[in-house]
Image (cartoon, rainbow, N blue to C red):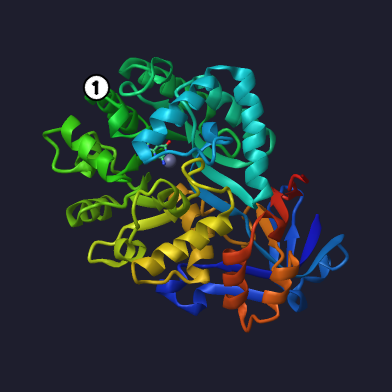
Amino acid sequence: MKCLTGQILDYADDPRRAGDSAIRHIEDGVIVIGDDGRIAWSGERSDLPANYATLETIDYGRKLILPGLIDAHLHFPQYRMLAAFGKDLLDWLNRYTFIEEQRYCDGEIAAAAARAFLDELLRNGITSCLAFSTIHPVALDCLFDEASRRNMAVASGKTLMDRNAPQGLLDTPQAAYDDSTALIAKWHGKGRLKYAISPRFAVTSTEAQLEATGTLVKENPGLLIQTHLSENPAEVEFVASQFPWSKDYTDVYDRYGLLTPSSLFAHGIHLSERELARLSEAQSAVVHCPTSNNFLGSGLFRLHHTTESDHPVNVGVGCDVAGGMSYSMFDTLRDAFTVSQLVGSRISAHEAFFRATLGNARLLGTDKEVGTLEAGKYADLVVLDPCATPLMAERHALSRDLHDVLFALMILGDDRAVAETWVAGDPVKPRS
Ligand code: GUN
Ligand code: ZN
């Protein structure tokens, strides 16, 4: 067993809705980590039970210890293709992304990519994610093998696509069903891994494949489902032309039974009120990926309109690498802030860090295991240094309260502000 000391911060709920009582901030805090990699105790140093008082201690001083950050949407096979100069989503997919992803039929390439991808997440304090892979079962095997070796809580699945992409990225409805079924049996629930049924988006699946996807959902109730929805106006138009019977984009997924309480739809920028109401009724979630939306010029997501209308929809956050411009959760939250400014409502730093921790854990169905610093949860942690650079230290001197400190971190921070990342009780930040 060991002890970490420092400032500790976690959220019991969304502070925007529940108020400041949802924020637990302890300036002189202690986290006790058990030999099982879980948190044995956390709280005020003055309340530390006597039997923990002599444990080996790592002192983080004034640094902040938070639950490990969670990314609810990104693409493993796009790990190195950031900064591709595309016009918009469909152009970027066709010119760069579909070419890069075809390499993942090769197990050696995929294994090396999995190491680099997970290293990059850990370097940024991200201990858990829901990620897309490719259609190739071997690519998913490599990602899950590497995550398993690191004891990381990773959710992913084989991508399903059978049209409108190069031949090397297409499967069939039957292969989609057979491969997914075999991979679910092989991986779901192994250690901390979760399987996610993963149709890429309506553009790249035939009706027959969406039908097969619906069958997978029925046969595996409760499994995560991830896809993309209403990201870009040209995409929305294309989907309408491919599914002329549909009321709208959301209705396409609805028809095949893909709207469930464990469904996460990336983007959801251009949804109608009808679509929001239907997502709300189904208790499905939308994942806001602001650096991607800005990079691809996809549009401005209306965060609080989505979460607070008459038909509220849960919203997670993700970097969407490599449509996204950065792995850093600080960058994701910074762009969530600037986009919220542009649509006339501000996301606070507390709401932002809640969404990147317990909020995303709830959407991934892992909130009993991670997302806060409560005893019993895995010791997946991130240690943040608000004074990581000379400029940040000077800015920190101006901060008047905790919100100021967190806000400066999310606006100015990068991986240098991640002093350490802990996964299941071990320090694992790769040193570059
Ligand atoms: N829609 C379908 N595939 C993708 C993808 O790889 N990235 C993004 N941003 N949107 C998508
Ligand atoms: Zn995506």
Nearest the eye: 287 or 192: 287
Instruction: Say whether residue 13 is left or right of residue 274.
Output: right
Nearest the eye: 257 or 112: 112
Estimate the x, y position of residue 380 in percent, counting from the top left: 65, 52
Estimate the x, y position of residue 164 in percent, counting from the top left: 31, 24
Question: Image point 52% across, 62% down: which residue?
Answer: 334
Mark 1 crowd level (few <14, some 14–19, many ≥20, 10 Å Cα): some
Question: Image point 72% across, 47% down: which residue?
Answer: 36
Q: 76 above or below 308?
A: above
Mark 1, ligand 1, within 8 Å: the answer is no
Question: Image point 32% across, 50% down: which residue?
Answer: 268
Callout 1 amino acid: Ala
Viewer can see residue 144:
yes
Question: Image point 45% across, 65% down: which residue?
Answer: 338
Which residue is farthest bottom? 400
Quadrant (top left/top right/bottom left/bottom right) for the C terminus: top right
Nearest the eye: 386 or 314: 386
Q: 327 above or below 81?
A: below
Quadrant (top left/top right/bottom left/bottom right) for the N terminus: bottom right
Which residue is farthest left? 245
* Ligand 2 quadrant assignment: top left
Instruction: Say whether residue 201 is left or right of residue 389.
Output: left
Badge 1 marks a residue whose secondary structure is helix
Residue 113 occupies quadrant: top right
Number of callouts = 1
Estimate the x, y position of residue 395 in percent, counting from the top left: 67, 75
Q: Which residue is mark 1?
A: 208
Viewer can see residue 28:
no
Instruction: Say whether residue 378 is left or right of residue 352.
Output: right
Nearest the eye: 33 or 244: 244
Q: 381 above or below 432?
A: below
